[in-house]
Image (tube, rainbow, N blue to C red):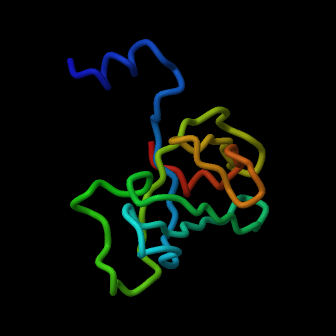
Amino acid sequence: MDSHSADAAEDDSWPTAQLVAEATRWVDRDHYPWVAEVVFTDAGGVRHSIIDKTPLFWDDEDVPEADAEFPVPLYLYAVVLERDLPGDRIRVAIDHRSVNDEGYGEFIVEAHQVIE
């Protein structure tokens, strides 16, 4: 069992799902690691923006090229906090301590936006 699996067995907050999102632009390519903006829309129709370094969004081999055409689909690791909310919704927390532009890390999203 690798260390991540051992951690997962002991920690219920280990990411168990992926939230469908998309990278929309490079924010900073002058410094390494690069910084990208990733967005998704919650169940209320509010678009959330997370701006952070590429290692939080991609493995090294998956980082888009500097001249990539945006948007680029991706998945944000998330922890499902509450299922079966009214309207087929799920409450999730985004992994990696990422927060949106308002400082929130928990969101209610449509169930179809989450892959478990």
The quadrant of the picture occupied by the C terminus is: top left
**Residue 88 percent across, percent down from the top left:** 68, 49
Count of numbered badges drawn on the protein:
0
Q: Quadrant of residue 84?
A: top right
- At 35% from the left and 57% from the top, the residue drawn is 58
46 shown above or below 98: below
- At 48% from the left and 77% from the top, the residue drawn is 26
Towards the viewer: 42 or 56: 56
**Residue 73 percent across, percent down from the top left:** 42, 70
82 shown above or below 55: above
- At 65% from the left and 65% from the top, the residue drawn is 49
**Residue 103 percent across, percent down from the top left:** 74, 51
The quadrant of the picture occupied by the N terminus is: top left
Towards the viewer: 94 or 97: 97
50 shown above or below 72: above
Q: On the picture, is 55 further left or further right than 87?
A: left
